[in-house]
Image (cartoon, helix red, strand yellow):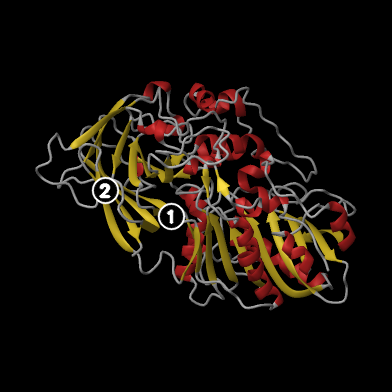
Amino acid sequence: MLRHAACSLAGLLGLFAAVLLFPGMSAGQGLEYVKANYTKFEYRIPMRDGKRLFTAVYVPKDSSQKWPLLLSRTPYSVKPYGADQYRADLGPSPLFGKEGYIFVYQDVRGRWMSEGEFVNMRPQLSQPADPQAIDESTDAFDTIEWLVHHLPSCNGRVGMWGISYPGFYTAAGVINAHPALLAASPQAPINDWFQGDDWHHNGAFFLPHMFNFMAKFGYERPEPTKKFEHPFDHDTPDGYEFFRRLGPLSNANARYFHEKIPFWNEAMQHGNYDDFWQSRNLRPHLKDIRPAVMTVGGWFDAENLFGALHTYKSIEAHSPASAGNTLVMGPWRHGQWARDEGSSLGHVPFNAKTAEFYREKIEFPFFQFHLKQQGKLPHPEAWVFETGTNQWKQYTAWPPAESRLQNLYFQANEGLSLSPPKEAEPGPGFDTYVSDPAKPTPFIDWTDIGMPAEYMLADQRFASRRTDVLVYQTPELEADLTLAGPIEVDLVVSTTGSDSDWVVKLIDVYPDDYPDPAENPTRVRMGGFQQLVRGDVMRGKFRNSLSKPEPFEPGQPTRVRFTLPDTSHCFRSGHRIMVQVQSSWFPLVDRNPQTFVDIYQAKEADFQTAIQRVYRTPEQASRVQVRVLP
């Protein structure tokens, strides 16, 4: 029996972790085992335009049968290089090695040892007239075409998989797919870098994530190379102070990058959702997909939650003849499903080894069925882990067809209710706070230089006590309330500035007598814990269009609507539902000057304090709309 190790480095580490060698990765099968059971080959596979892509192939030594092929394409290196230098792990999980597959890892065009020019999230071609025109779909097609004709041990059945950036390459690979590609699993795939993945959410710039990533990943590689490392030292562990002292975004080049990071330079020239970003939106191309697709994501994926949900939704809407389209969402950080047992994140336990269940009961059977024709496909339309009750749920559609819309209205005296505001409520009909870019609201209450995954479900008590954060809260729930699907934000606001960010957070407030865990090394008390369930930001000038920003008229009540990513969460009886509203989330989101300017080119003088109002009258009701299960 062939056996091997956990996930490939390319798939495991994902966009940000791949560069930083994220700790906590599960151990591999072992170098000696891989060498004993596989033979490694290295090829330079020609593409239709003549460029050659470096490809490492691990073939089972058992020649008694032919094997299906699993392909992963990555910008993060297929190292170690050398036909006699082996990886210590192969495939999506250890289960695949013992069954036997041909494992293929490829440096994408223009990265590491592959020829050609690298383009970040290369735009997808529509109907190219030039037969030599290339994109990531054609490179995947040409790679598979070469492999099935040049590997005698391949049985002609091919699968693809990858996490984060490799997830994007997997999603691109199913577009106009090679006939041999029967199954693909894009996991936390990049989908749209301006609306919801990685660098922007609704046009708001996720500063430490892009800065830290590009500081290591973003340098040009002039020619194929086995060594391509670029260390960066912040000289402090305090991200809040590092990015506050940075000042306007233009200082990043002046002080650190010195115009040597091409994609950073391009991003700074495209502050709106123009052709540069729209061409990197994969959703319009995810149509008429033929291979079976299993898209995987994590509810607490700080990088590509949007990408997983919208890759699935796009295929579902535009591929009626698909061989199958499945969504898997677990309670995971970025790539956690491939790294550890998935039993907790931050201070929140899930009371189950969720990642082990996924690897054994969901991922492995998917590829076994489609590539080896073994077993019965057990998958529903959606495998979804419901937090709060901490259990896997199966649905025939996502969002579930049985869910119904329910409004949570902002009320006076920090109230949150299923009923709209009443005419006779006392007070001015709005709540007010001051937003100061010089002292922005922090997004975590601990010190970190980047974007820690735990922020996605971190305790929000520190924020609820600030004067620049509004709080609305229900009484204790008398029965469980389960949400399943996207969350719609509908605010009526005004600002004394001409632009503003609006951050909305949906929070599960634990009972005051909630017990602490048996082991509590950080000494966080769980009584009254305010767990972030979902939060996101709308850059106000994009409230009507990401492509055509509009200023606010100072002091004029204005409607701001946007969508928070889907959730599957049960607010248990005895808990409360809280909504927080604020105008900065720093340094997770860069500072909005609160004046209508190109923020990428803003000057220090553009940053101004603003007085914000959130309205809550019958005529100007602010609310959050959720999908509730019966």
- Whether the residues at callouts 1 and 2 have beta carbons within 8 Å, the answer is no
Question: Quadrant of the rendered structure where residue 579 is?
Answer: top left
Question: Quadrant of the rendered structure where residue 486 is?
Answer: bottom left
The percent position of residue 609, horizontal first and vertical second, equals 32, 24
Packing grade of label 1 (10 A; few <14, some 14-19, many >=20) is: many
Q: Give the secondary structure at mark 1.
A: strand
Residue under numbered circle 2: 623
Determine which of the numbered discs, if any, sits on residue 477 in the image.
none
The answer to whether residue 180 of the structure is visible from this angle is no
The answer to whether residue 104 of the structure is visible from this angle is yes
Of the image marks 1 and 2, the number of the one nearer the N terminus: 1
Q: Amino acid at mark 1?
A: Thr
Q: Give the secondary structure at mark 2.
A: strand
Question: Quadrant of the rendered structure where residue 472 is?
Answer: top left
Q: Amino acid at mark 2?
A: Arg
In the image, is 147 to the left or to the right of 449?
right
Determine which of the numbered discs, if any, sits on residue 567 in the image.
1
At 88% from the left and 57% from the top, the residue drawn is 35
